Each structure stands twice: as structure tokens, then as C-alpha cells.
């Protein structure tokens, strides 16, 4: 068993990217169209799998041939924040929301930082459950006024009791290539989804950590689903944030 090591991979260092694949571009355009149609739904309570537009994909670290789609429901009481410092920007602090203790996410490789610079994650408790329209308005306004913060939605597993905190979307997910030569596909996909390649595993070189930035239009879960459903990669694993354990969800790779 290996834990991901911190090998920095700055996108500016990626040289010689080949001409973009029209197949990749067409796939992303089509999938985004379906995703935006799903985001227009107003009902935040989904009891049946086929009623929820929110889900994540899993296939057993790339060794299970059966794709598993797990549906989740939007939790409009909480918001996930990823920051470069363990303190809230003035705009967010003045909104008066309850803030959890800051959790440090240790890694290097963020393009704007030197080695060993950490990120910090916290959650905001809005105090009540909002409608999806109200919720996404707050998310958009917060993102617009705080350009150095990654703002993400919260979710619950289907069927959980009301009031359950659930889990937030952070800034990253993991991708396993089908072969070494597929790195060019990874570069193309990250560029077209507004993501960055953060680092590559030294021991298992087919595995990469992919991150969104403050400028990304989509959240990490949406990007992870795009990567997964493209069929271009062996596996894609979402990194959810869960304050109930005092840290981000651990990720391990098994040989």
C-alpha cells in the first residue's frame, strides 16, 4: 500500500502538448450541456436514484470492470471552502455564518506556491436549509467576491436523516491513466476543464492528482465526473472533505 507522495507538477512545465483531440473537445461540450440542464432542477430532496442530478463515479480503483454510479443529494445548509491561509476573507467573515475549525491539507505543487505550502479547508454552516436557487446564488456571489477562495457545495448520501452534515467538495480528485502514453490526453482534458495537474505518484506513475483552481468554472465533483465519463482513463476517484473526522478523506492506492 502506498500513500500519494508530493511530487510537484507545475502545468507551466508541461511541454510539447500535441494538437487537441477533437473527440475530447466534442465530448466535453456534450456532457456539459447535460450537466447544466440537471443543475436547473429545483427540488433538493431526492429519494430515488434516477431523480437526483448529483452523483459520483467509482469502479474500485480501476480494477472493477463494472462502473458504479452513486447518487447523492444536495445539502444546502453547508458550504465548503478551500483557502490559502487559515482565516476567512473579510467578505465571508462579515456574512456571519458559523465556521468549523480550519483543517490543513498537506501537499506541495500548487503552482503559485513554493515547496511545502499547505492549503486549508473549512465549512460554513448557513444556519438553515435553503432552496437550491438561494444556495447557488450564495455560492456564486461568494466566489465572485473572493477570488482567492475555492467555493464548493455540500452533499449527503441518499436516505440520510435530515440535519446530517454530509460531505463537501474540495479542490481535487485522482486520475489513473490507462497507459503512460495517455498523459497527453490528461493534459488536454485538464486544459479544457480548467483544471491543473498537481502531481504524479512516483511509485505508481499512472496516478495523478488533479486540482481545480479559483478560476475554474466547474467544481471538483463536476470535473471528476467529466474525466470519468470520457472513458479515456482507467479510474477517477473523487476527494471529498469531511470535517467529522477532522481532516480530508484519506486516499490510498493498492497494488
Image (cartoon, grey):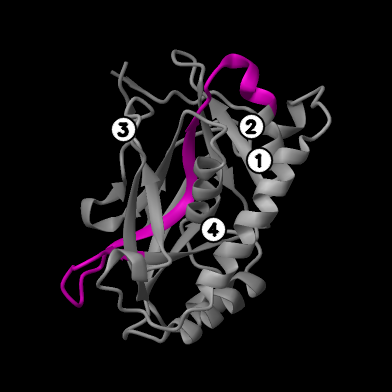
Query: Does 113 sit left or right of 208 as displayed?
Result: right
Where's residue 125, x and y in %? Answer: 34, 75
Query: Is any atom of residue 244 visible in this view?
Result: yes
The residue carrying mark 1 is 190
Q: CA distance from mark 4 to mark 1?
A: 13 Å
Q: Identify the disc placed on residue 186.
A: 2
Query: Is any atom of residue 90 visible in this view?
Result: no
Q: CA distance from mark 4 to mark 3?
A: 23 Å
Q: Report the span colored magenta.
A: 155-184
Badge 4 local density, few (<14 within 10 Å), some, or many (20+)?
many
Where's residue 31, x and y in %? Answer: 60, 55
Q: Depth check: give the residue in front, 226 or 107.
A: 226
Q: Identify the disc placed on residue 60.
A: 3
Residue 175 versus residue 49 in the image, above or below: above
Q: Depth check: give the residue in front, 76 or 232.
A: 232
Name the mark nearer the viewer: 3 or 1.
3
Q: Which badge, 4 or 3, is on the more N-terminal residue?
A: 3
Residue at 15%, 73% (x, y): give it.
161
Q: Is residue 114 magenta?
A: no
Q: CA distance from mark 1 to mark 2?
A: 6 Å
Name the mark nearer the viewer: 4 or 3.
3
Amino acid at each position: 500500500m502506498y500513500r500519494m507522495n508530493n511530487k510537484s507538477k507545475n502545468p507551466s512545465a508541461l511541454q510539447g502538448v500535441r494538437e487537441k483531440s477533437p473527440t475530447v473537445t466534442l465530448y466535453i461540450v456534450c456532457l456539459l450541456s447535460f450537466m447544466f440542464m440537471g443543475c436547473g432542477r429545483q427540488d433538493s430532496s431526492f429519494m430515488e436514484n434516477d431523480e437526483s442530478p448529483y452523483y459520483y463515479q467509482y469502479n474500485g480503483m480501476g480494477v472493477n470492470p463494472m462502473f458504479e454510479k452513486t447518487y447523492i443529494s444536495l445539502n444546502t445548509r453547508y458550504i465548503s471552502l478551500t483557502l490559502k491561509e487559515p482565516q476567512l476573507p473579510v467578505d465571508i467573515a462579515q456574512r456571519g455564518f458559523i465556521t468549523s475549525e480550519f483543517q490543513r491539507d498537506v501537499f506541495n505543487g500548487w503552482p503559485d506556491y513554493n515547496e511545502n505550502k499547505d492549503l486549508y479547508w473549512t465549512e460554513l454552516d448557513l444556519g438553515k436549509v435553503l432552496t437550491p436557487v438561494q444556495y447557488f446564488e450564495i455560492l456564486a456571489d461568494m466566489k465572485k467576491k473572493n477570488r482567492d477562495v475555492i467555493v464548493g457545495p455540500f452533499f449527503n448520501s441518499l436516505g440520510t436523516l435530515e440535519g446530517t452534515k454530509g460531505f463537501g467538495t474540495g479542490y481535487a480528485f485522482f486520475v489513473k491513466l490507462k497507459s503512460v502514453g495517455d498523459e497527453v490526453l490528461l493534459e488536454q482534458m485538464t486544459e479544457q476543464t480548467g483544471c491543473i495537474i498537481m502531481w504524479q505518484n512516483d511509485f505508481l506513475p499512472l496516478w495523478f492528482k488533479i486540482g481545480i483552481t479559483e478560476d475554474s468554472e466547474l467544481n471538483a465533483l463536476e470535473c471528476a465526473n467529466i474525466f470519468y465519463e470520457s472513458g479515456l482513463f482507467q479510474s477517477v476517484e473523487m476527494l471529498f472533505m469531511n470535517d467529522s473526522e477532522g481532516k480530508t478523506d484519506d486516499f490510498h492506492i493498492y497494488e
